[in-house]
Amino acid sequence: MSTEPILEINTNSGVMPKGSEEDYWRAVETRDPRYYSSFVFAVRSTGVYCRPTCPSRRPSRDRIEFYSTPKSARDAGFRACLRCRPDELQMKSGQVQAVERACNFMDQNYNSKIRLSLLAEIANQSPFYFHRTFKRVMGITPRQYLEAVRLKHLKLSLKQGESTRRSTYKVGYNTAGWLYSERDSKIGVMPSDYKSGGQGLVIAYNISDCNLGRILVAATSRGVCFVCLGNSDGKLINYLSDEYPKATIISEPETDIQLQEWVSQILQYLEGKNKLLNSNLPIDVQATAFQWKVWKELQNIPYGTTRSYNDIANRVGVPRGYRAVANACASNRVPLAIPCHRVVRKNGDLGGYRWGVERKKKLLQLEKTVSN
């Protein structure tokens, strides 16, 4: 990809010229800070638009549209991301360039020991100011960025057939313990299963009718790994395939009593017959230690009540981390079992929900009705 920011934009329609879309997509995939103010991307499934550097999880390419300005995205009916806040004033070019230098260094030296003081020196800033600037531009801390880079290279190593231990050492860690949170692997499934994009992993799924449309519940042999809501069976299956592109994905076999039971528990919840409190559904999902910490707090929210993103941030020990909490909620791949719909904005507004705000509203109404 070119080292220069994208300058060619269609200022009349606001839509980016098609000839360069692959460059835009690569910039979004890599969160390249050089493209911070060049364009915004909008996600059709969530109705949200972001800057290329937004730390949120990337959707599949076919769900993304590119716009030259935040206003163009708003005019098209999208709303601003609460995490990267694309409508706010852009950072000064010097700040973005300083962050770019630090990112380039981490990209090239991810397998080395990198201290904050070294990155600050590269950015020609004090450690405190650099840390604050980096988080403002990127939406995550330098440590989180470095971990993401290392995780990307670890996945590539696993796909090439390297062992978990060797792959972990190659990306700069001296123990495979880094790869795990307190409950599961950072890459969602066991590292051995992740090789070649999940090749060899068998995932069974069930699609059922419910009061929110159609619901897909998918599981590995270890637990539920994906839950999604929608109106089209084809789209639900595509969402699952995007998560595990090389896994063997099969429709629920009649002999899979375990999956049938898990589906039954979720459907009973949607009918108001099962509150799924502190859900004992075994789950097998991608998560960091911080995400698990947030998700446990979500499971502790009493049935029929809500908490704000700020409340959850305080409870997990990051009072100013409501954006990180919002991102952890958005990364939840097993909604209902982990009730991210119970988290709302500080002013009481519902906020966003991956499967549609109307579904979030119905879930809260259901819980309130049953709990009264």
Image (cartoon, rainbow, N blue to C red):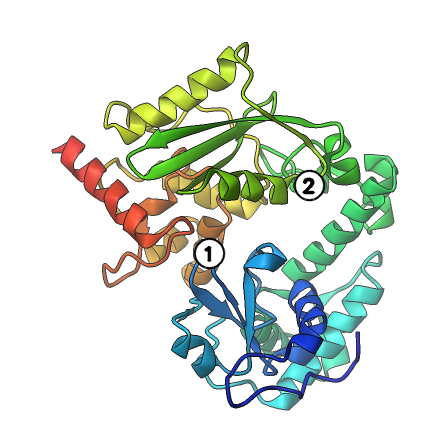
User: What residue did someone put label 1 on?
Assistant: 45
Q: Nearer the viewer, residue 231 or 122?
A: 231
Specify the label residue 188 is tagged with.
none
| Label 2 crowd (10 A; few <14 / some 14-19 / many >=20) | some
Residue at image point 43% right, 82% down: 71
Residue at image point 70% right, 65% down: 30
Q: Are marks 1 and 2 in contact (CB under 8 Å)?
A: no
Q: Quadrant of residue 135?
A: bottom right
Residue at image point 45% right, 24% down: 281
Q: Position of residue 311 (x, y in %)?
A: 33, 54
| Label 1 crowd (10 A; few <14 / some 14-19 / many >=20) | few
Specify the label residue 245 is tagged with.
2
Q: Is residue 259 above or below residue 307?
A: above
Q: Nearer the viewer, residue 322 or 258?
A: 258
Q: Is residue 56 above or below residue 176?
A: below
- For badge 2, the amino acid type reads Pro
Say what secondary structure mark 1 lies in. Answer: loop
Residue at image point 38% right, 71% down: 77
